[in-house]
């Protein structure tokens, strides 16, 4: 049992958690408290909006519609990760639900999921959820296909963790609308057990330090196996003719590009150069392109000839902005042509949004 947060405390909790907060004008007095009590509060309920592009989704959640007056939630979390505060108090978001679920949330006494709900708004045994739950309406079509951008999902987790932290609640105080009412399916597109694990992870960090889990990296392994002639005096992009692995799909067959932004990558390219005279140098560097236009060069690595076969491993680590691609380029500074006998590139790529 908890007294609802004041508007000021809610804003402070969200900002401390690292949320981008927009206070919609008038939200602090926008509520349905005249229809019944607001509190004691016991948890946070997650919804999807069932809206697509072109909808004033924040206005909808603030004002409601002809069949259901607003506010329709404490806030609306849009696809860009902004938490728009739309109501302070009772809101028309939860409706009637199952008392057994409420008791499990109050006690945080359930396992992976709360007990199955057998109630809904207007059913004989339903209890009022609008008085007992904060609500986040989260912008999504709700068709199971509309994606949840990483920045939005992280914002939903952090906004929920902010309320839980402020009340001293654990992650089991967060439920989906589908876990409250047997009429509902939201939020569709992510699993509430996974969501609660992320809320638990956020709560395990000091406020504001959780930024979500790094996505799994994608593996890229390219090569030059036939060898090619490298003439003196000009920078030349390595064209990778063999793909052993290209999980990102960023490398065109026989092309030079091995990564496209926005992304981070880390790895190396192993080079075998024949015919480089002892003491002569081949330089290697990463270069950024935008389309076919050369934009930025990165620091040079020098490969010094040994008089026979020369071998070197060049590190490849960088963050690549959107619209840019990365290549490896070589410059033969010897007075004679050399042969790039082989080049083996191995990198892990973390795609960013």
Image (tube, rainbow, N blue to C red):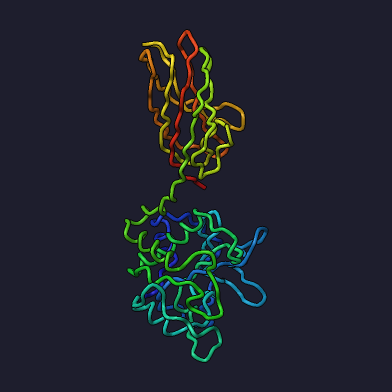
Residue 17 at what x, y percent from top left?
A: 39, 57
Residue positioned 50% across, 59% down in the render: 83
Name the residue nearer the viewer: 116 or 238.
238
Q: How many marks?
A: 0
Which of 3 and 226 lies nearest the eye of the viewer?
Answer: 226
Q: Is residue 14 above or below residue 239?
A: below
Counting from the top left corner in percent of width and height, residue 87 is at 52, 68
> Left of 157 or right of it: where is 241?
right
Q: Residue at the far top: name it.
A: 335
Residue 123 % position (x, y): 54, 88
Is any atom of residue 58 visible in this view? no
The image shows residue 343, relative to residue 1, as above or below, that is above
Horizontal and vertical percent position of residue 349: 46, 42
**Quarter assignment of residue 299:** top left
Residue 32 seen from this side: yes
Give the residue at x 47% y 28%: 286
Furthest-front residue in this view: 226
Which quadrant holds the N terminus?
Answer: bottom left
Image: 270 above or below 85? above
In percent of the image, x 42 and y 80: which residue is there? 115
Foreground pick, 215 / 57: 215
Residue at point 43% right, 18% down? 274
- Image height of 116 relative to 47, above or below: below
């Amino acid at each position: 049992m908890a007294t609802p947060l004041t508007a000021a405390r809610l804003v402070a909790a969200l900002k401390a958690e690292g949320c981008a907060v927009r206070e919609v004008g008038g939200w602090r007095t926008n509520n349905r408290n005249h229809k019944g009590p607001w509190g004691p509060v016991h948890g946070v309920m997650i919804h999807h909006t069932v809206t697509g592009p072109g909808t004033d989704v924040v206005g909808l959640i603030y004002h409601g519609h002809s069949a259901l007056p607003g506010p329709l939630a404490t806030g609306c979390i849009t696809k860009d990760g902004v938490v728009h505060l739309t109501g302070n108090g009772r809101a028309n978001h939860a409706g009637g639900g199952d008392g057994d679920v409420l008791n499990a949330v109050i006690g945080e006494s359930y396992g992976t999921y709360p007990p199955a709900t057998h109630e809904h708004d207007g059913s004989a045994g339903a209890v009022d959820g609008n008085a007992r739950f904060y609500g986040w309406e989260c912008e999504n079509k709700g068709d199971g296909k509309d994606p949840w951008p990483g920045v939005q999902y992280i914002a939903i987790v952090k906004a929920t963790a902010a309320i839980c932290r402020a009340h001293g609640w654990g992650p089991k105080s967060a439920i989906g609308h589908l876990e409250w009412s047997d009429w509902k399916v939201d939020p569709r597109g992510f699993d509430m057990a996974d969501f609660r694990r992320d809320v638990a992870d956020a709560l395990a960090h000091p406020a504001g330090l959780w930024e979500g889990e790094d996505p799994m990296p994608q593996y890229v392994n390219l090569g030059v196996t036939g060898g090619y002639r490298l003439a003196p005096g000009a920078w030349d992009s390595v064209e990778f003719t063999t793909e052993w692995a290209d999980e990102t799909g960023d490398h065109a067959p026989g092309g030079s590009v091995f990564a496209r932004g926005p992304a981070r990558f880390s790895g190396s390219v192993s080079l075998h150069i024949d015919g480089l005279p002892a003491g002569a140098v081949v330089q290697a560097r990463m270069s950024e392109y935008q389309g076919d236009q050369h934009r930025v060069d990165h620091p040079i690595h020098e490969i010094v000839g040994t008089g026979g076969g020369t071998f070197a491993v060049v590190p490849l680590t960088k963050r690549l902005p959107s619209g840019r691609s990365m290549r490896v380029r070589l410059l033969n500074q010897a007075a004679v042509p050399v042969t790039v006998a082989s080049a083996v590139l191995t990198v892990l790529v973390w795609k960013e949004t």
